Every structure is written in structure tokens, then in C-alpha cells.
Amino acid sequence: MRMTIASPCSPVRLWGAVLLILPLLALAGCSTPKSAPSQFAAFSKATSSLAQISQKTYVIAVTVNSKQTIYSLSKNPAGFDPSTYAINTDNVASFGKRMLLLQALQLYAQSLSDIFSSDDLSALKTNVKNLCTTLDSLKANETLKPYFSDLSLSFSDFGNYLGIGLSRLFESRRNAVVMKALEETTPTINGIVAALQFEFGMCATASGKGSSGIGSLISSYYDRYLIDASKSPIAGGQAGGGSADSAKSAKSNTIESLIQMIQTRDTLCNILILTQEALAEYGRLHAMLSQAFKPDHEALSDALVDLQLKLQNIDAVFSAVSQKEKN
Amino acid sequence: MNDSILNFVEDAKKRLLQLQAEHPEKKEAVQETIRFLDGLTKSLQEGDFEAILLSALILAFDGLVALEKIEVSVKTYDPDGPSADFADAIAEYEKAMSPPENAKDLKTTLSKIGSASVYLMRQLQLFTKKYPAATACDELADRLFGLPPKIFTLIQRLDDDEIAKLTGNLYARSRELHKTANQLKQLNEVLSTASTAVNVAIGVLGFLAKFAPLI
């Protein structure tokens, strides 16, 4: 599908453009529901929220990795092996790559929203150009290549179609560009969602079939900590060495410490479950976005509201965890 | 800790032989249970994960059996009954010890038992602090204190291969275990000499039997 014709005015290319745009015009129609721009703006907002939550999840991985490192070094300096990490987020480049990917996702959604809010041809051209530049640069970025290599169309070429024919049908052309962009990027967005889901994984206690990804890090760290914490007063001889009251007090402290650890672990594992659900919902929602062009799109509106609520809920849980950490 | 589990196993075996003497028709079920306990005693002496599982389950079922006494004790000292948190902790513990039919896996179930035991210990301690004469609560909290390290060690140590091996063994034996547990349960219910050790052994067998076919 990638266009490789050298001359921008060649008849083959013009026919190609007509063939590309006509079916899209038929799909998009000429009358766009008034709510469509706000749908795309809501999608952009949801993408930003999802990216921020994903970023926080990666920060958890880095934090747990650091704690794991300190803990492992304190227990067995010689035997510590960082390669056992389920996901190596200690590496700055590796962490940066993930942040870049999340940023790319936000840029893409923002570009779609900008295109949809364009109110004249000039703004539309600028916004489409921005989208194309964004997607082409992502495609060319060596670090992100695995995620964007499936894009079959060259977006620079795609952007050129805006200037060809049917110049009076501004709304139809805008819709056609967005429809085509959605169609082209769906496999890529699904790939990014799948990659994030894979890396986040699940805790052992939540997945039912072993832990994976960041969930594995959380399970491993907290379970090891819990083993030591639950043994501490007896292992340290505090229970046997002091008075009955001090032994009771030591046990009581141990139980409180265990409860705090269990609660933090369960909250982090719950965040992973909720984030996995939100990611799946996000992928479904992206595939539904073309419904914004149809007059009857309650399902899309409902899905956008649901996703936003889910993301707000996750953010609230994150805030509660960080508040607890501060206390 | 291992010694106390070995003592428990010895006590359970002694009681089981008494049951067998009183009810020779149940010899098969009693012998099956003794073989099971012997196999796990051997594992315990070798220190492998099946032994940790056995000792954790014995502790956990001992706690479950003791809970009946605790409920009586709580009502004795506090006519209003346990606080909502205490009642929740008891309910969660009982729930964790009875894996539902949709129990996902061994690690999940063990993790729930581990967490539930910690919450129960806290409530038992709080109750004892309020009513120092409620020694049954204090004793149970003390006994349960050995449970979390075993549970968390199991969760940490059980890798996929070990789970496959363990569940494979249990699955193969699940029917027999289930039958044995039921026979012993019925027997124990009609005997005046019902013992805690036998009750706990029934609990352990029942737990494993109920759990294994789900995997």
C-alpha cells in the first residue's frame, strides 16, 4: 500500500488518491455530528491520563527494583543478580524508551483531536502535517521501530492527498483523513497496548497462574520482605530474650508491619489489574472512534465516560498510595 | 517448629489408631491417612516444599478448629459479640481456608490464607488487650504466629515446575483423599473421643482433596 511514485502529479498517483479518498468520503459522509470534536478531545484527554498512569506504573517498577537491589545487597552482596529482574527498568535508556512511547501515544491522540478541531483548510493542513510528521518520525525512530514498523502507509505521502481535488468539501476531507489515520494506526495502537499489558503483567495473587512483568517484581519483592518481616522477632531472639510484655509488643509490631506490607502489595497489585483493564478498554475504544462520525454513537460516548472514570479511579488509588508513603 | 508438627503428626496417628481399634471397618481410611501423614513426615524431615505446605496447613487448620472455641470465648467476655473488624477477620480466615470452587491456584489460595491469618492475629491481640482474661484468643494468636513465615516462604519458593509436580501428585490422589477425608469426618462426628489432631488431619486432607481437581 505504500506509495512510491516519484512525481507528485503523475496520473497514477492522482488516481491512487481518488481511489483512496472516495470510499472514505462515502464512509465519513458530509454531515459530522456536532459532538464529534469533543469525542476526539475526550479521547486525547483519556490518552494523556493513561500515559501518566503508565508512567507511574513504570516508576513503581523502578522503585521496587531499587528497594530489591538494596534489600538483596543487604542480604547477600555476592549473590545479587540484577538480570533476574522481570523487566530491566534500571537502565536509563530502557526507561527513556518507554517514556518516549507514552509520549508518542499522547502526541498521536492530541494530533487527531487538533485535526478534528480545525475550522479552516489552512489549520487542517497544518494539523494533518503535524500528525504525519509525528507518525513518520515515530516510524523512523530506531528505538520505537518495533512498535511502528507495521504502519503500511507513508504518512508524508498521505498528508499530500489533502491538497488534491475536492477542495470544497472541507469537512469530508477532514473526516477522511481522520478515518484513514484511525484505520492505519489501529494495529500499531493495539501493538502498543499489548506491549504495555505484557510489561505490566499481573501479581501472582491476582493472575491465578503465576506472576508476570512488573507484577512479578512486586510479588517477588513483597513476598521476600514478608518472609523476613514475619520471622523477625523470633529470629532476632527478641521474643525469647525479654519480658513477656516486650515479646508481646515485638509480635504486635511485627503484625502491624506485616499488615502495612500486605496492604501496600495488594494495592499495587490492584493497580495493575485496573490498569490492565483500562488498557484493554483503551484499545477497544480506539477501534470504536470511527463511530464519532455517525449520528448514533451512544456506545462511544459511554465507553469514553467509562474509561475516564476507570482512569480517575486508578489515579485516586495512586494518590492514596503516595499519601500513605509520605505518612 | 518442625518438632511441633512432627508431634502433631504422631498424635494424629495415635488417635487414628485408637479410632481404628474402635471401628475396624474403617481400617482402610485410617491406614490411607496414616500413609499420607507418613509420606509428608518424610518430606518434612527432608525439608522440601511439600513439608512446608503440610506444616502450614496443619497450623492453619489448627487455627480454624480453634476458632469455634474463640467465638464462645469472645461472647463470654463481650456479650455484644466481636467487633465488625473481628467478625470480618474471622469470616475472611474461614473463607480462605475453604477455597471456593473457582479457586484459581495454589499461590492465590495460600496468599489469602497468609493475609487472613495476619489480620486475624491483629484482631485476636486487640481483643486480648481489651479483655486480658480471654486467654484462648491470646493462645491462638501465639499459635498462628508461625503461619505467615511458612506461607510467604511457600509462595516465594513455589515455582511453576514445583506447582506442576505438587498438583500432579495431588490430582492423582485427590479422589482417594476426598473419600478418606469424608470417611474420617463421619467417623469423628460420632465418636466421643474426637480429637483436635484428627479434626486437623481431616481438614488438611479435605483442603488438598478439594483443591487438587480444580487445577
Image (spheres, helix red, strand yellow):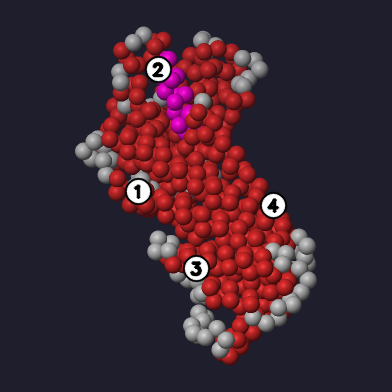
Identify the mark nearer the N-term, 4 or 2: 2
Q: Are marks 4 and 2 on the same chain?
A: yes
The circle drawn on residue A250 is 2
Image quadrant where residue B60 sits: top left
Q: Is residue A66 visible?
A: yes
Work out whether mark 4 precedes mark 3 in sequence or the reverse, and give the earlier one: 3
Amino acid on which the number 1 mark rests in the picture:
Asn
* Residue A102 as seen in the image, left or right of residue B157: right
**What residue is pinned by disc 1?**
A91
* Badge number at residue A136: 3
Could you tell whether B116 is left or right of B9 in the image?
right
Q: In this rendering, which labeled residue sits more in front, label 1 or label 3?
A: 3
Foreground mark, 4 or 3, reads 3
Which chain letter matches label 2?
A
In x, y percent, where is residue B3?
29, 27
Of the residues tagged 1 and 2, which is closer to the observer?
A: 1
Instruction: Identify the magenta region.
Output: A248-263
Give the Cα distance between marks 4 and 3.
31 Å
- Distance from label 3 to label 2 (Cα)? 61 Å
**As shown in the figure, which amino acid type bears the numbered disc 4?**
Val
Q: What element carries label 4?
A: helix
